[in-house]
Image (cartoon, rainbow, N blue to C red):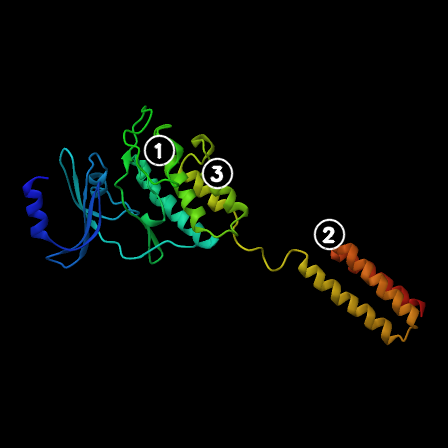
Amino acid sequence: MKENVEEFLNFRYEKLKLLKRSLRGEVWLAQNRQGGDLVIIKRVQSVGLPYDLLRRSAFTLPAKVFYCAEDSAETVIVEEFIQGEHLHKLSEPQARQILMQMCDGLKELHEQKIIHRDIKPSNMILQGERIRLIDFDAARLYKDGKDEDTNHLGTKGYAPPEQYGDGQTDPRSDIYSLGVTMKTLLDSSCGGGLKAILDKCTAYDPNDRFQDVDELKDALTLEDFDEPPLTTEQEPRRLDLYFFAARVLLFVIRREFHTPLIVLMIIIVLLITSQTLNSGEDFQDVQTESATVEEFKLDDE
């Protein structure tokens, strides 16, 4: 990297701690000498990364990029230090909310043809109630008409098949990695609509997945993940029938009918209740018929 870049970094920032070092580069926690804000300084042994586009855009998902420089072999980035926690186990409602936010954030990136290519739990940080996506070191710009990626990067287990040379990565590739990530973070009880959605995200063939994050968000919006309501349409009718049964029994007892007649009336009420709940017929009709029976009894006396 050119000397003036090193001079600028040393003048503006103080390195505090080495966070990571590998063959592909190094990551430092640093502090702005003027304002005291914490930042991340990265040196990546790669070029053609979309960090300059991230710097010039107001994306909501990635860290804000303050500085980016590139030469023939290396890219240097200074970006926002995101304080938060990495994702661990999630409930279905939590997963759904994070998926919805990821859809909105990835849509901004995909519209600029940025494919992240390394979505996984360690690259997702929950900042309060806001999800953030970090580490664009494997990201690339989608190019129309290209057969496959130049660099086959990504994390085994999270990267889709096409990321290993079976085709060019596109928005459906990020959808695949996002689906695998959510499956990893959800407990074994995940099922129903959410499981079906994640299964479609992680289909082997990209044509069998959601074709963009709008489709995925639509599926998440339309699918009802809430617990079933505590009362159903038949609950009020069931309560009304119980009150009606109590009235009939009280009428029989007050009239001092003999025991066999009481037993008969109880059987009749139970039969009416059972048939009404099973057939779904309108309670109003049952109530009308019962009133007629009661009137007949009174007249008979």
Residue at the front extreme, as displayed: 23
Q: Secondary structure at mark 3?
A: helix
Q: Residue at x 40, y 39 (%)?
A: 175
Q: Can you tell which of label 1 and label 2 is closer to the viewer?
A: 1
In the rendered structure, the answer to whether residue 186 lies left or right of residue 152 reads: right
Where in the figure is residue 95, as x and y percent of width and height?
44, 51
**Front position in the image: 110 or 249:** 110
Question: Distance between the Cα atoms at labels 3 and 1?
Answer: 18 Å
Q: Which mark is residue 280?
A: 2
**Front position in the image: 22 or 79:** 22
Q: Residues within 10 Å of mark 2 (few under 14, many from 20)?
A: few
Q: Can you tell which of label 3 and label 2 is closer to the viewer?
A: 3
Q: Which mark is residue 200?
A: 3
Q: Secondary structure at mark 2?
A: loop
Q: Which mark is residue 163?
A: 1
Q: Residues within 10 Å of mark 1 (few under 14, many from 20)?
A: many
Where in the figure is residue 182, as x and y percent of width and height?
43, 47
**Amino acid, disc 3:** Lys
Residue 184 in the image: above or below residue 248: above
Q: Residue at x 91, y 72 (%)?
A: 259
Question: Distance between the Cα atoms at labels 3 and 2?
Answer: 37 Å
Where in the figure is residue 269, as x and y percent of width and height?
82, 62
Residue 218 in the image: above or below residue 272: above
Question: Distance between the Cα atoms at labels 1 and 2?
Answer: 55 Å
Quarter of the figure with residue 104: top left
Q: Residue at x 87, y 65 (%)?
A: 265
- Quarter of the picture holding the C terminus: bottom right
**Amino acid, disc 1:** Gln
Quarter of the figure with residue 243: bottom right
In the rendered structure, the answer to whether residue 168 lies left or right of residue 292 reads: left
Where in the figure is residue 280, as x and y percent of width and height?
73, 52
Q: Secondary structure at mark 1?
A: helix
